Amino acid sequence: MTDDEARMLTGTELDPQKLYMQVEGLKDVLKLAVSGLSQQSLRNLQEALEKVCAGSVEIPGMAEALEIVKEHSSGAPHLQ
């Protein structure tokens, strides 16, 4: 996410390093949360993220979230 995108989303000036750390923290939280999901929940989440990513409006972070879910699901070939 660029500084301009962050300002547009929040309406404020953000320190790029602070924003980076927040994003990395959220990715860690998502990895932890995904690790506790059942196979059905992982499948549902992956499908939902794929629909969002295929939409006409790009939502920052959704493609990265999808990659995290896919990485976690890599042990379950039926989810790929």
Image (cartoon, grey):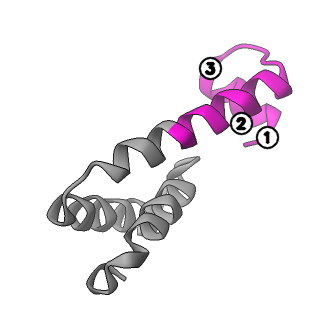
Residue visible at 43% across and 64% down in the picture: 72
The quadrant in which the C terminus is found is bottom left
Q: Earlier in the sequence, mark 1 or mark 3?
A: 1
Q: Residues within 10 Å of mark 2 (few under 14, many from 20)?
A: few
Q: Which mark is residue 5?
A: 2
**Which residue matches tag 1?**
2
Measured Cα–Cα span from mark 3 to mark 2: 9 Å
Which amino acid type is marked by label 3?
A: Thr
Which amino acid type is marked by label 2?
A: Glu
| Secondary structure mostly seen in the magenta stretch | helix
Which amino acid type is marked by label 1?
A: Thr
Residue 43 at what x, y percent from top left? Answer: 24, 68
60 vs 48, left or right, is right
* SS at circle 3: helix
Q: Is residue 9 above or below residue 78?
A: above
Q: Which residues are magenta?
A: 1-28
